[in-house]
Image: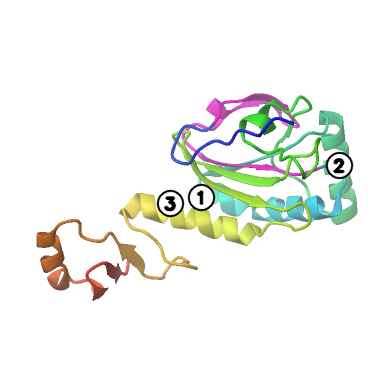
């Protein structure tokens, strides 16, 4: 099998045109909004079912953050429709976002979702955060055997939006309300001024502040 290609962070996300359970979709349809594009190995599988239920329950939270959800697997549109109906009937959860039909693996290949050694015809659990300008900002890969943490994706999106809005970084495990990291000084003069700038400064390279 050919080595999969991978998109790169901070570059334009690969474009796509695809059939989905909500009609045709393209990357351009999401301009001006954040997009979480995520793949799953197959319809009617238990781990994927729990993930889709998790994404569905968090859909309003993502929407409030100007973020849309878009699923994908190699299965057919008819399989997607049957699976989402099954989730509604058996688990009482309606899937409020589209799922891409990618039988020819065009989108999966462009995003590096199919890995040799995992399964030749299945997309791994890959998740891509694309910003309102169509730039790929984060990628997260999980193994076939383990489900993703949707709450972590909510936290990561909150962190990236906070960094963009305030030109700051966020520490490990940051959640809204916690202090953020101020960019370190880049010149000797700036280093000497840092202690008097009003930040919580541990050392010249590490300063935090409240928002």
Q: In this view, does 205 lie to the left or right of 41?
A: left
Q: Residue 161 carries which label?
A: 3
Residue found at x 40% / y 62%: 170
Circle 2 is placed at which residue position?
A: 83
**Secondary structure under badge 3?**
helix
Name the quadrant containing residue 153.
bottom right
Q: Where is residue 20 in the image (x, y as percent from the top left)?
A: 73, 29
**Secondary structure under badge 2?**
helix
Residue found at x 54% / y 35%: 7
- Residue 132 lies in the magenta-colored region: no
What whole-number distance in Å separates the C-alpha atoms at marks 3 and 2? Answer: 33 Å
Residue found at x 77% / y 51%: 144
Quarter of the image containing the N terminus? top right
Q: Can residue 201 be seen in this view?
A: no
- Residue 17 lies in the magenta-colored region: yes
What whole-number distance in Å separates the C-alpha atoms at marks 1 and 3? Answer: 9 Å
In the picture shown, does residue 103 fall above or below 115? above
Q: Where is residue 152 in the image (x, y as percent from the top left)?
A: 59, 60
First in sequence: mark 1 vs mark 2:
1
First in sequence: mark 3 vs mark 2:
2
Name the quadrant containing residue 2.
top right
**Secondary structure under badge 1?**
loop
Circle 1 is placed at which residue position?
A: 65
Check contact, mark 1 vs mark 3: CB within 8 A. Answer: yes
Q: Is residue 94 left or right of residue 161?
A: right
Q: Position of residue 79 (x, y in %)?
A: 87, 35
Instruction: Give the mark toward the camera: 1 or 2.
Output: 2
Give the extent of the magenta segment: 14-41
């Amino acid at each position: 099998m050919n080595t999969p290609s991978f998109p790169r962070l901070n570059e334009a996300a690969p474009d796509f045109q695809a059939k989905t359970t909500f009609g045709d979709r393209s990357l351009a349809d999401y301009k001006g909004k954040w997009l979480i594009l995520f793949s799953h190995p197959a319809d009617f599988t238990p781990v994927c079912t729990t993930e889709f239920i998790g994404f569905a329950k968090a859909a309003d939270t993502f929407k409030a953050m100007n973020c849309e959800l878009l699923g994908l697997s190699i299965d057919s549109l008819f399989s997607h429709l049957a699976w989402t109906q099954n989730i509604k009937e058996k688990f009482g959860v309606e899937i409020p976002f589209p799922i891409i039909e990618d039988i020819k693996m065009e989108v999966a290949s462009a995003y590096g979702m199919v890995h040799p050694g995992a399964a030749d015809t299945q997309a791994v659990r890959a998740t891509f955060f694309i910003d309102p300008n169509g730039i790929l900002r984060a990628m997260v890969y999980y193994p076939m055997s383990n489900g993703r943490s949707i709450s972590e994706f909510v936290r990561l999106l909150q962190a990236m939006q906070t960094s963009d809005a305030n030109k700051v970084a966020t520490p490990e495990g940051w959640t809204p309300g916690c202090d953020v990291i101020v960019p370190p000084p880049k010149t000797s003069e700036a280093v000497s001024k840092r202690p008097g700038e009003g930040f919580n400064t541990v050392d010249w390279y590490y300063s935090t502040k409240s928002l």
